Image (cartoon, rainbow, N blue to C red):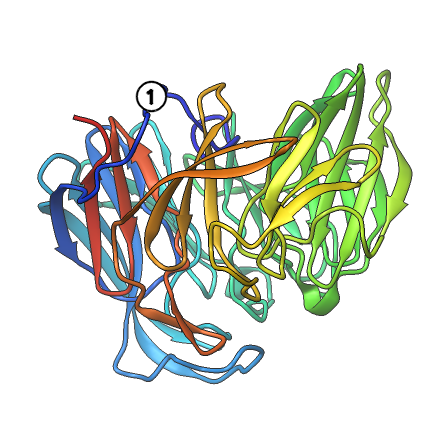
Amino acid sequence: MGNQRDNVLRDVAQLEDLPSQPEVAWRSELDGGYAGPAVGGGRVFVTDYVTSNDVSVANFERNEFSGIERVLCFDQASGKLQWKHEYPVKYTVSYPAGPRCTPTIDDDRVYTLGTEGDLFCFRVTDGSVVWSRNLREDFNTKAALWGYASHPLIDGDRLICVVGGEGSHMVAFDKKTGDEIWRQGTAPEQGYVPPTIIEAGGVRQLISGRPDAIASLDPETGKTYWSVPYEATNGSIIMSPVTVDVDGTKYLYIGGYDKKNLLLKLDPDKPAATWVWQDEVKQGISPVNVQPLVVDGIIYGLDQKGTLMAVEIPSGDRLWETSQPLAERPLGTGTAFIVRIDSTDRFLMFTEMGDLVLGQMDRSGFKELDRANVIQPTGTAFGRKVVWSAPAYADGKMFVRNDKEIVCVRLTP
């Protein structure tokens, strides 16, 4: 979601259209995975899973698969492999194509989290391991149904992770050594919500989205500020919670599978929250694969039924919804990763069909402006071919992967 974790692209504000046949600057071989690439310091980091097993399995099905997870570093300009680190992993999760979490770059180090909880800190220059932990073994837990998918968060000297286990749903590690700083919470399962920092009530609050509650913590100590019950369907709570400012009042929204949603009003003077509404069938949005974003009090995103929609806060009313840019009719769990182009009303959407769409979107509706195909879908979900991996954008280029390759595409001259 970028340096500010807000899905705003700030270096291509003048993008007016897309090349009809995008120029591929380079392409390099890759294996399976959902983890997007991360770009920084002239390098591209991505993770994958190499296996001879058939990983095309039904949703909710958990079997064992043997293979090797890899962390790869490519030169940003040429695509040449600079280093790689690999380790054997036995998968026990559904959708076992590969890792979920985009690497996190922090100065001269990069952090990766594998599907079964293998957490690493590498030096970006040569791939040497600074420290590592196996979250399942260290905290006596197991991977969630769809694996470890909550991206770790760098906060000062801390690396904050969703872990699982008794009393350790969320854990803060020393980012330099891997030593534990604090642990907090117990939940039926990890869920998939990344740790998220907001500012409200005069303090910084770490929001924890668990399958049984939404909680606010002190990011320095793990102490709980407040907690509100939430019941996730099949543990499926995924999106990073978003804050919405409306006429000086700040709200916190989170939504999960099967029309589970929750809107809270944040206290302006202290770390506290008031319940507004919850689990409204025809209000809010229930994202699955796609992180929604907020512009001028409106949440834009892809709902679980595959429609793009605009939701007004605090009413939760759906101002409009459309099956575009995916198809003429809604696709269940339809996926198009959305970023906003600077402070404009234009957005880039990378669809599960491998198309990059330039669109215009505001409270009145969505309009497609341009479209170009950049990569082929290689994964399988719900009987159709998909690519469910968020791209990275940097220096006027797009970096995107499927289960066979990673590609660098020029968006601007």
Image: 73 above or below 231: above
Tell me if residue 295 can be seen: yes
Q: Which quadrant would residue 236 be assigned to in this image?
A: bottom right
Residue 172 horizontal/vertical position (percent): 58, 41
Residue 267 horizontal/vertical position (percent): 86, 23
Front one among 3 and 251 = 251
Total numbered badges shown on the rendered structure: 1
| Local secondary structure at mark 1 | loop
Front one among 269 and 136 = 269
Left or right, 159 with reference to 70: right
Left or right, 115 with reference to 235: left
Q: Which quadrant would residue 43 be assigned to in this image?
A: top left
Q: Amino acid at mark 1?
A: Asp
Tell me if residue 222 can be seen: no
Residue depicted at 46% across the width and 46% down the height: 337
Circle 1 residues within 10 Å: few <14, some 14–19, many ≥20: some
Left or right, 178 with reference to 19: right
- Which residue carries the number 1 mark? 11
Image: 48 above or below 343: below
Residue 276 horizontal/vertical position (percent): 90, 38
Residue depicted at 86% across the width and 16% down the height: 269
Image: 220 above or below 130: above
Residue depicted at 89% across the width and 44% down the height: 277
Residue depicted at 29% across the width and 48% down the height: 400
